[in-house]
Amino acid sequence: MPERTCSIPDCGRPHKARGWCNTHYEAWRQHGDPLTLLIHRDRGSPEERFWAKVDKNGPIPEARPDLGPCWLWVAARIGNGYGNFWDGHRVVLAHRFAYELLVGPIPDGLEPDHLCRVRHCINPAHLEPVTHGENARRGEAGLVMNALQRAVTHCPKGHAYTAENTSWWQGHRKCRACDRERHRRG
């Protein structure tokens, strides 16, 4: 009895199930179409595929209208809202791919900060390479912490946070009067 082959024209691989080879069967199982993989092979260069997933007519960011419109990533995003993209070798963050494509490499030790505060924006003009600490200070968590710190006007011992009585250490306010007392006690 002759060995059955895939029913897709010009495939010729051995039959697995439903009349298809393993490749076409898995494409049907995962995507509902046995030809999905064949279609994806001819979609163009990584740059062509990338720009097909970008809307350059995005909104003007409320936080920074001076930057102009966001370029929105309209394809897959990870849980925290950043776009992701298969560059042909690995999954990369879309805003990093755009920055490196249009501006150049991101310097070692730095990461792109979204000045517009729109995580799925990939406009390189909206990105600034900064240290991780600076990015965290500028981010949502940093804004909340700064607001909370401003709401507290006195240290736990009752000294006012004035310009003369306040020092900063690693992004946190410290009461100079309390520091002096601590140094006196030794």
Image: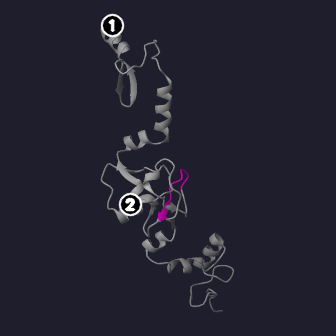
According to the picture, the residue beneath numbered tag 1 turns out to be: 185
At horizontal 45% and vertical 59% (from top left) the residue drawn is 122
Residue sitting nearer the eye, 1 or 112: 112
For the stretch drawn in magenta, the main secondary structure is loop
Mark 2 and mark 1: span between their CA atoms? 53 Å
At horizontal 63% and vertical 69% (from top left) the residue drawn is 30
Q: Amino acid at mark 1?
A: Arg
Q: Up-down: is 23 above or below 151?
A: below
At horizontal 31% and vertical 8% (from top left) the residue drawn is 184
Q: Is residue 170 visible?
A: yes
Residue sitting nearer the eye, 144 or 6: 144
Which labelled disc corresponds to residue 99?
2
Q: Is residue 93 visible?
A: no
Q: Is 81 a magenta residue?
A: yes
Quadrant location, the C terminus: top left
Q: Earlier in the sequence, mark 2 or mark 1?
A: 2
Q: Residues within 10 Å of mark 1 (few under 14, many from 20)?
A: few
Residue sitting nearer the eye, 70 or 174: 70
Residue 6's x, y, as percent? Answer: 62, 86
Q: Is residue 172 left or right of residue 80?
A: left
Picture quadrant where residue 48 is located:
bottom left
Secondary structure of the residue carrying numbered label 1: helix
Residue 117's x, y, as percent? Answer: 48, 49
Magenta residues (range): 78-85
Q: Amino acid at mark 2?
A: Tyr
Q: Up-down: is 88 above or below 183?
A: below
Q: Up-down: is 164 above or below 36?
A: above
